[in-house]
Image: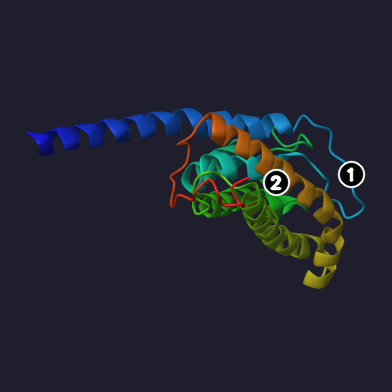
Amino acid sequence: MSEQTHDDRSADTATIDRARELTLVPVFAGIVAALGAVPAISMPIGVPITAQSLGVMLVGAILGARRGFLALLLFVVLVAVGLPLLSSGAAGLGVFVGPTGGFVIGWPFAAYAVGWLTERIGTPYSVPRGIVANLLGGIVVIYAFGIVGLALVGDVTLLEATTGSAVFVPGDVAKAVIAALVAKGVHAAYPGLIPARAARTPKDPAGV
């Protein structure tokens, strides 16, 4: 009887998790889309500074790897089918062969990386460690995709693409900090959003 009860509880938990996923994934895809309403800052190299990369970090930091990836994948698919959700208003498959194409393609993978690292922070969520997760996933991963795409589409060398993209780094570092602070508040208000890989004691100075 106890084993059956345990199985029933496991099934109920799986159902709840699936329902939560079906709710959170489109909601956070919508948040990234809403951030596209923030005016972009045009740059000489043709890649604008937008608030949507902040959304990528937020999604990974709040939802974790799997849900974060699915939320940004949904966003990218909606852009591909023609919804003008990017801050530039661009949409359709042509987006992915333009200067920003590599960056947009990298968003789901960046959200996954941020989420994967965040899951390994443990509980409570640590802002300093969260910033590191956001920097690695939200900057390194996105730039890896974006710089390669920019080099291919813009017919420039990887070094030139990297140098040209460096102008975005200070702003993205600020976004990583903001995303970690917001994630800290969300996880404090809604614990259990992502799996806790390890627990740290409240005395841990990193758990601020």
**Residue occupied by mark 2:** 94
Question: Looking at the image, is 79 positioned above or below residue 204?
Answer: above
User: What's under tag 2, amino acid-wise?
Assistant: Gly
Q: Residue at x 84, y 33 (%)?
A: 39
Q: Is residue 122 left or right of residue 37?
A: left
Q: Give the quadrant of residue 163.
A: bottom right
Which is more toward the observer, 154 or 199?
199
Q: Residues within 10 Å of mark 2 (few under 14, many from 20)?
A: few
**Residue occupied by mark 1:** 42
Q: Residue at x 71, y 48 (%)?
A: 176
Q: Residue furthest toward the front?
A: 203
Measured as percent of width and height from the top left, residue 60 is found at: 57, 45
Residue 80 visible, this angle: no
Q: Residue at x 45, y 49 (%)?
A: 199
> Could you tell me how far apart the alpha carbons at marks 1 and 2 are, in whole angstroms?
19 Å
Disc nearer the start of the sequence (1/2): 1
